[in-house]
Image (cartoon, helix red, strand yellow):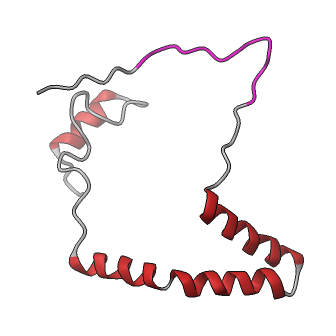
Amino acid sequence: MAQISERSAKIKKGGAGKPFVKGVTGNPGGRPKRTPEELDLVAACKAKTPAALIVIENIMKNGENERNKLAAATAIIDRAYGKPTQPIAGDPDRPLQVIGTIRLVRTA
């Protein structure tokens, strides 16, 4: 049987619905820095963006079916203007209520 870590043991003691130990971050070091190889890959992808846009535009204009044309047109619009926001719909008789607040405190 595989051994469990001390943190995992604390989580199991906490019971169902409480997967994290209070006061302990799941990622204390934050997001890892990108490696030089990852940075090179991102730069190469960005360099190919104009060619990719031409391919998408070609599909939009000359695609075999309407679904592909619409998907290509949507991809172009989404990249130019961002995806549209999704409104939150609810019951007008029961409006949404804020049940808690988060306050940012800056320390020197």
Residue 87: % across, % down: 71, 36
Residue 62: % across, % down: 83, 88
Q: Magenta span: helix, strand or loop, mainly?
A: loop
Count all numbered tags in the image, as a single digit. 0
Q: Considering depth in this image, is 104 or 91 the residue closer to the camera?
A: 104
Q: Is residue 105 above or below residue 66?
A: above
* Image point (37%, 76%), residue name: 42
Judge from the rendering whether residue 91 lies leftward or rightward of residue 2; answer left or right. right
Q: Quadrant location of residue 81?
A: bottom right
* Image point (66%, 87%), residue name: 55
Q: What's the magenta region?
A: 89-101
Residue 97: % across, % down: 60, 14
Judge from the rendering whether residue 42 lies leftward or rightward of residue 80; answer left or right. left
* Image point (74%, 87%), residue name: 58
Q: Considering depth in this image, is 63 or 11 the residue closer to the camera?
A: 63
* Image point (26%, 55%), residue name: 31
Residue 40: % across, % down: 30, 82
Q: Is residue 81 above or below residue 47?
A: above
Q: Quadrant location of residue 66?
A: bottom right
Judge from the rendering whether residue 78 lies leftward or rightward of residue 20; answer left or right. right
Q: Considering depth in this image, is 96 or 54 the residue closer to the camera?
A: 54
Residue reaching furthest to the left? 108
Q: Quadrant of the C terminus?
A: top left
Residue 30 within the magenta-colored segment of the rendering = no
Q: Quadrant location of residue 47?
A: bottom left
